[in-house]
């Protein structure tokens, strides 16, 4: 006698709620199935079953999978997670008994079965043991966008889907950094979600959709929603910014944000910086740094040469005084030999006293190069610019001597350019009066960029010809260590403990 064939498992996506949005394939599978399974709360009502109700026949075997808990409050010895794991194991065993008997089982799932769906817990426990097919369904995200009647994402925009159960600070960071977003699982999480939208500066754009395509559907502005009225089946939406009308703003609503892009491209941006860049009406900066920022429809970019910092700052503040939201783009950290000082200097004038200005930090060139080399900045260090364009060389030399005498690690910015070729040699010779020729010097060039080069040389072997404006030098102290590890890589670090003698 041949072995009995097992049944087939189906995860059936039913769409967002309107039975008319079920797919033809979903209806076919329900008709073919022997067993119809669906999840429900302890009250016994199942939204999934109600969507598919007219396709369920009297001869179908029904398997209600009733959750033991619907919140994280439980007296189960394993807590909420333990209670749910036990439930999923028991539910999978019940479905397995039908499958072993050769019956076809269709597990109904609202939306799409593998998109935040309960079906996936059955899938992970059964799909490797039985023939399985998943029938995709229209998600609540798609339904919400359709009900809003506005594009969700367009072109190269990024859509971020977030559970409202994330920590509030995490939600804030992700909302600030993305183009478009949908936050699921509202209900009791709504107050924190709303605060996250507000803290990220995205609340004016945010929309609210409740029970999309279902009875009791509600659509509106998120800012006006009463927290006590929000059910679990609701989403918050940040739709596409492309083509969206920019709100009319009074002149006093403009402002300038000085942002640091880090040493290279997008990987070095913070979420807050990404958000400020995306929200700006105008981007102002040195063209090389502006090129690191993605082009966004509707934004105006004002590029300029690297030697007109005061003029650039004044231009940005004038735009903001007319009600524009302006991001002044700076490399590295804007407060370290960069644009923040220039903007604040101009902003201190009476004409701009009422223009809001804020500075957002970025990863510095020193920190980036140090991380690539190891931890040469692990103890006290000084940052000095070798450029004599804005201060005389005598001041630079005096500061180098003072830092060298104090045995500080040195981060030397702006070491050389086409028009400045002698400062590195002068600095090296001066430091050799106080440091051993064996002192490690990290040369970090284009860190994070396509031409990145990070290597370490002896101070006595430092060749000025190998240093340009895109290079930063990290000169060790008497305590800085430089070793080659077993794998062949070199590491440089400065111990945090300093000898007492």
Image: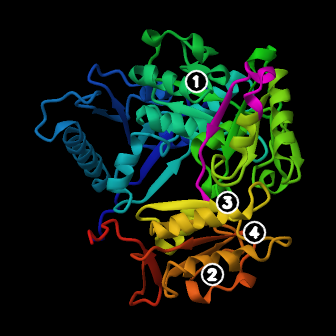
What is the x, y in percent for residue 56?
45, 30
Q: Which residue is mark 4?
A: 469
Q: Secondary structure at mark 2?
A: helix
Q: Does dot 1 land on a helix, a strand or a loop? A: loop
Q: Earlier in the sequence, mark 1 or mark 3?
A: 1
Relative to residue 176, is residue 199 depicted above or below? above
Task: Give me the C-alpha separation between circle 4 and circle 1.
Answer: 62 Å
- The region drawn magenta spans 346-365
User: Which tag is nearer the camera, tag 2 or tag 1?
Assistant: 2
Say whether marks 3 and 2 touch (CB < 8 Å). no
Tell me where residue 181 appears, x and y as whole percent.
61, 35
The CA distance from mark 4 to mark 2 is 20 Å
Residue 388, image x and y in percent? 76, 62
- Residue 197 placement, left or right of 486: right
Residue to which mark 3 is pinned: 395
Instruction: Tell me if mark 4 has few (under 14), some (14-19) or many (20+) residues whose alpha carbon lies within 10 angstroms of its own.
Output: some
Q: Secondary structure at mark 4?
A: loop
Residue that appears at 65% across and 54% down: 332
Disc nearest the viewer among 1 and 3: 3
> Badge 3: few (under 14), some or many (20 or more) residues near its Cα, within 10 Å?
few
Q: Nearer the viewer, residue 164 or 271?
A: 271
Left or right of 144 in this view: 347: right
Count of labels shown?
A: 4
Mark sitting earlier along the chain (2/1): 1
Q: Which residue is mark 1?
A: 18
**Residue bearing mark 2:** 429
**CA–CA distance between discs 2 and 1?**
78 Å
**Relative side of 199 to 479, left or right:** right
How far is the residue under mark 4 from the one under mark 3? 20 Å
Q: Quadrant of the C terminus?
A: bottom left
């Amino acid at each position: 006698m041949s072995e009995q064939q097992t049944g087939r498992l189906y995860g059936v996506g039913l769409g967002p709620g309107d039975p008319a949005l079920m797919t033809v394939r979903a209806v076919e599978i329900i008709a073919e199935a022997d067993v119809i399974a669906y999840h429900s709360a302890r009250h016994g009502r199942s939204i999934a079953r109600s969507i598919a109700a007219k396709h369920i026949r009297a001869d179908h075997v029904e398997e209600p999978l009733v959750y033991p808990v619907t919140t994280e409050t439980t007296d189960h010895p394993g807590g909420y997670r333990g209670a749910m794991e036990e439930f999923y194991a028991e539910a999978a065993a019940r479905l397995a008994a039908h499958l072993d008997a050769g019956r076809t089982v269709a597990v109904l799932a609202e939306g799409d079965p593998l998109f935040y769906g309960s079906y996936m817990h059955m899938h992970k426990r059964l799909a490797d043991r039985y023939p399985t097919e998943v029938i995709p369904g229209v998600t609540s995200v798609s339904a919400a966008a359709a009900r809003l009647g506005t594009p969700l994402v367009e072109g190269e925009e990024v859509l971020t889907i977030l559970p409202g159960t994330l920590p509030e600070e995490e939600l804030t960071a992700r909302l600030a950094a993305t183009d478009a977003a949908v936050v699921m699982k509202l209900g009791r999480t709504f107050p924190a979600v709303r605060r996250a939208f507000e803290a990220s500066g995205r609340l004016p754009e945010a929309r609210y959709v409740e029970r999309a395509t279902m009875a009791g559907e509600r659509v509106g502005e998120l800012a006006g929603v009463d927290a006590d009225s929000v059910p679990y089946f609701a989403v918050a939406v940040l739709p596409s910014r492309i083509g969206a009308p920019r709100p009319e703003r009074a002149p006093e609503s403009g402002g300038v944000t000085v942002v640091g892009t880090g040493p290279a491209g997008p990987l070095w941006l913070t979420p807050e910086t990404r958000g400020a860049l995306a929200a700006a009406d105008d981007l102002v900066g040195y063209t090389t740094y502006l090129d690191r920022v993605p082009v966004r429809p509707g934004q105006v970019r004002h590029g300029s040469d690297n030697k007109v910092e005061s003029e650039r700052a004044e231009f940005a503040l004038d735009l903001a005084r007319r009600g524009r939201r302006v991001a002044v783009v700076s490399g590295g950290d804007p407060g370290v030999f960069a644009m923040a000082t220039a903007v604040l200097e101009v902003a201190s004038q009476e004409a701009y006293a009422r223009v809001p200005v804020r500075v957002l930090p970025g990863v510095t060139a020193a920190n980036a190069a140090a991380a690539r080399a190891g931890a040469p900045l692990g103890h006290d260090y000084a940052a000095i610019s070798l450029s004599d364009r804005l201060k005389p060389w005598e001041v630079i030399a005096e500061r180098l001597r003072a830092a060298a005498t104090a045995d500080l690690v040195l981060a030397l910015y702006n070491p050389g350019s086409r028009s400045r070729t002698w400062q590195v040699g002068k600095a090296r010779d001066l430091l050799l009066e106080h440091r051993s020729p064996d002192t490690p010097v990290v040369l970090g060039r284009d860190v994070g960029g396509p031409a990145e080069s990070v290597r370490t040389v002896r101070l006595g072997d430092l060749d000025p010809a190998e240093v340009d404006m895109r290079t930063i030098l990290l000169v060790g102290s008497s305590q800085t260590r430089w070793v080659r590890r077993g794998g062949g890589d070199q590491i440089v670090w400065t111990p945090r403990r300093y000898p007492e003698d």
